[in-house]
Image: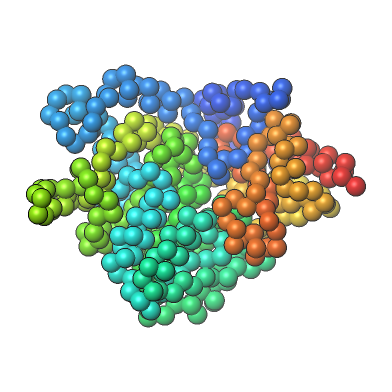
Amino acid sequence: MTRPTLQHHAFDVQKIRAQFPALQQTIHGKPLTYLDNASTTQKPQVVLDALLHYYQHHNANVHRAIHALADKATEALETTRRSAQAFIHAAEPEEIIFTAGTTVSINLVANSYGQTFVQAGDEVIISHMEHHANIVPWQLLCQAQGAHLKVVPISDTGELIMPAFEELLTTRTKIVAITYASNILGTINPIQEIVASAHAAGAVVLVDASQAAPHLAIDVQDLGCDFLAFSVHKAYGPTGVGILYGRRSLLERMPPYQGGGEMIKEVTLAKTTYNEIPYKFEAGTPNIADIVASQAALAFIEAVGQATMRAHEEQLLSYAHNQLSKLDKVQLIGTAPSKIGVVAFNVPSMHHLDVGALLDAQGIAVRTGHGCAQPLMHRFGVDGVVRASFAVYNTLQEVEQFITAVAKLTQEKK
């Protein structure tokens, strides 16, 4: 196998790897090769340190008390909000809402915006490649409101069929909810084109950026989207933190998603008035420590450089794709020309769970199953896949080990 040469000479993947304690372990007596990054990434030491530092020095509730510790906690949390604003180039920090993850963010928009502005006979458009988190909330909304859910089909290579999308748009379309990059196929979708068409039809656009955020530079103002959501745990940060961007003009028109402390201005037993954005949508005590530590994750990405990360991951992806395509007994699923670092495949003579277990025995961690995208599986006529997904700390040597292990499995299975 011919190994490509990395072109960005200032990038030292071993120095990157040294920052991730979890990568320094062995699994079943083998060095860990972690290729399940689309599920969640490992965490650099700076994120772990930030978590510990918060609990040791700043542990207090936010936005409530006037004592010094509470001030420090509040400022640390709001620093993350400003960092998230800069990370996706939102117009102002008030357009950043903290949630528990992408799933909660999408449910927030479906329940608050959707139940307010989607009426009987209206339409919501999703695509055939969506994660369940960007399918089920819209199904529930349409069922509750008497609206219609429409689905953009995809091609055999795993790309949206854009003429079909244009045909689905009507004056009754109120919401278009589309993934920026597929968690199974890796396909990067033409968000600007989708937004322009949707806006021309009078619809708003929600972008599921869970897979895009760790790999692509995001500018919500340039994209033109109305909502965008991602989970920090897929971008080297802690679990339990979601970033929801919403255009101010829309957020101000939306009712609260949940009731409780923080989201109120004044409460009487007869009536409640609500807080300003973003706090109107942040009821109760937030996940303070993980939100604070998320700032370190975003800073890590900025320090390495998204362009550098993208270049490295593209070389890993290209190499993996090329080598897997040479294996006669491997079926690749998702071959779009524009992809993030995800490869999905099957060995038709073996069950995908068996392939995953045999790779795990070699210390290679991959995802198996439907990947929370069962309609996509049905589209390709399979009940599951093996998925390898890459991050900045993965190496060409790891990809070689992965390819060699898959090749050996196909040779052994007659």
Residue 71: x, y in percent?
18, 29
Estimate the x, y position of residue 6 in percent, counting from the top left.
64, 38
Which of 358 and 186 lies nearest the eye of the viewer? 358
Residue at point 28% right, 66% down?
116
Between residue 100 and residue 182, name the one nearer to us: 100
Q: Quadrant of residue 367?
A: top right
**Residue drawn at (90%, 47%), measured in percent from left and top?**
414
Looking at the image, which residue is at 67% across and 53% down?
384
Seen from the viewer's position, the closer of residues 60 and 222 is 60
Mark count: 0
| Colour pattern | rainbow
Q: Residue furthest top?
A: 56
- Residue 339, located in which quarter of the rendered image? bottom right
Residue at 57% of width from left, 56% of height from top?
A: 373
- Furthest residue in direction right, as rendered: 414
Against 138, residue 214 (above or below) is above
Q: Quadrant of the N terminus?
A: top right
3 sits left or right of 137 in the view: right
Q: In the rendering, at what x and y percent does residue 372 appear?
A: 56, 52
- Please provide percent x and percent y for residue 50: 37, 26
Tell me if I can see residue 278 in this picture: no
**Left of 405 or right of it: where is 158?**
left
In the displayed structure, would residue 381 be above or below residue 408? below
Question: Does any portion of residue 54 appear in the rendered image?
Answer: yes
